[in-house]
Amino acid sequence: MPEHPRSVRAFRRAQRVLVGGVDSPVRAFAGVGGTPLFFSRGKGAYLYDLDGARYLDLVGSWGANLLGHAPPAVVRAVRRVSPRGLSFGAPSPLEHELGERLQRAIPGLGLLRFVNSGTEAVMSAVRAARGFTGRTRIVKFAGGYHGHSDGLLVRAGSGVAAGGRPGSAGVPASFARETLVLPYNDPAAVRLAFERAGESLAAVVVEPIAANMGLVLPKPGFLREIERSCRKHGALWIADEVITGFRLTKGVVHPRYGVHADLVTLGKIIGGGLPVGAYGGREEVMSQVAPLGPVYQAGTLAGNPVAMAAGAATLDELDSPLYLRLERIGRELESALREEAAAAGVPDLRMAREGSMLGLFFGGAYPTNLEEAEKGDRERYARFFWGALGSGIYLPPARLETAFASAAMGELELTRARRGFARAFRALAGGQGARR
Ligand SMILES: *Cc1c(COP(=O)(O)O)cnc(C)c1O
């Protein structure tokens, strides 16, 4: 098992200054136990920890690093613009240059606004939808993650009539009641919610492919029902493509299902590793946002020149050969996982994959919603995680997350991944590999 004394020391020190030693909870490894690794460097498909050990990175900054770590074209762009100023707090052409790239890639993206995170993008899109419709309530789906703004931290209380209950302390129940939570992949629940409360609903927020309860693909007809109900009752639908945007194709993924959202939210990949989010869509909705309209939303560092340049340089690297390569990398990783699990005598691995996104699950049937996803075996995931880490592979340090491959993975990395998975599965089958 890996020893990482420098990470252990760094974590101890970090805990004296940062809440839980981290700036985002899942990084603390509560989902798998033990001490988180601290990293000093990332290059291509690899992360390097403080002790100098190298890991094949299948987290990829939670999906942001489509091209791997420090891709040369993006680093060059950052080097080019940063000496000319790190923030203006005033317009620069870099903003519309990235915006135009997004418009070209996303049909129906009339107007958009850049913000600093996915959280802000979804929070602001919901505000715009409320401003446009004059209604207050929104619908989300259990297991959908849309950032940590108050009204979206509601996941419990599925069922049509049940008002939302906050999924976090500090969220007033009165806010949570404005959020209806429905089960993912349940078109009948969507229809019923609209029949009962359609006139009060401003928007439905949905991940077209759910990637925050593991990887859960939409069943045929689910997204269509959302679109149909929204149109019929005058609500807007917001496709939260913060993860899926530019991950699977050069643009957003929901049109693949024959549907078109009123608003889309983006983040992660479009910032090329720097903090960027965006929301946009139908012009008559977006023109409700200040300075054109009465919906206020602003940002000191929004449209930051360095972040805009990193985003544009990233998008310029994305073409169809790249997505074909990502598909092949995803397929190879899936085969390696399935075959090595079978070879080691691990019978309960279940998987889903879409392009370079992989969902790993230990238990009965692969889930279609949160309730099923929560039945996965946490202990076995944790043991597999530590086994893989000991074999030089960094997986998401929590079940109910998606693993992301990057375009920086070549043949050598695929071979290393297969060998690492094989060892991790053998340890899992043999009852070793646990590390708490
Ligand atoms: C990551 C994510 C967010 C939040 O983005 P942050 O940049 O972490 O605030 C919102 N929606 C989805 C679907 C995400 O995956």
Image: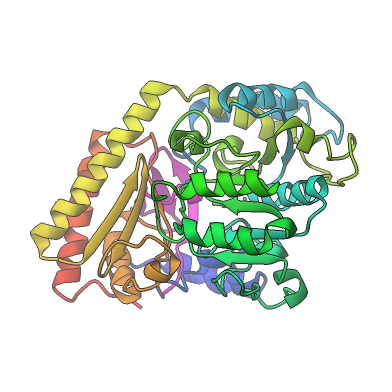
Q: What residue sits 50% from the left and 70% below the top?
A: 9
Q: What residue sits 83% from the left and 44% below the top?
A: 300
Span shown in magenta: 33-62
Along the line of sight, which residue is nearer the eye, 67 or 69? 67
x and y percent of residue 321 in the render? 36, 22
Quarter in which the N terminus is drawn: bottom left
x and y percent of residue 377 in the render? 31, 73
Quarter in which the C terminus is drawn: bottom left
Locate residue 27 relative to residue 170 in the image: left or right.
left
* Display coloring: rainbow
Residue 49 falls within the magenta-colored stretch: yes
Residue 160 falls within the magenta-colored stretch: no
The quadrant in which residue 96 appears is top right
The quadrant in which residue 333 appears is top left
x and y percent of residue 161 in the render? 61, 72
Locate residue 8 relative to residue 425 in the image: left or right.
right
x and y percent of residue 229 in the render? 59, 49
State whether residue 225 is above or below residue 312.
below
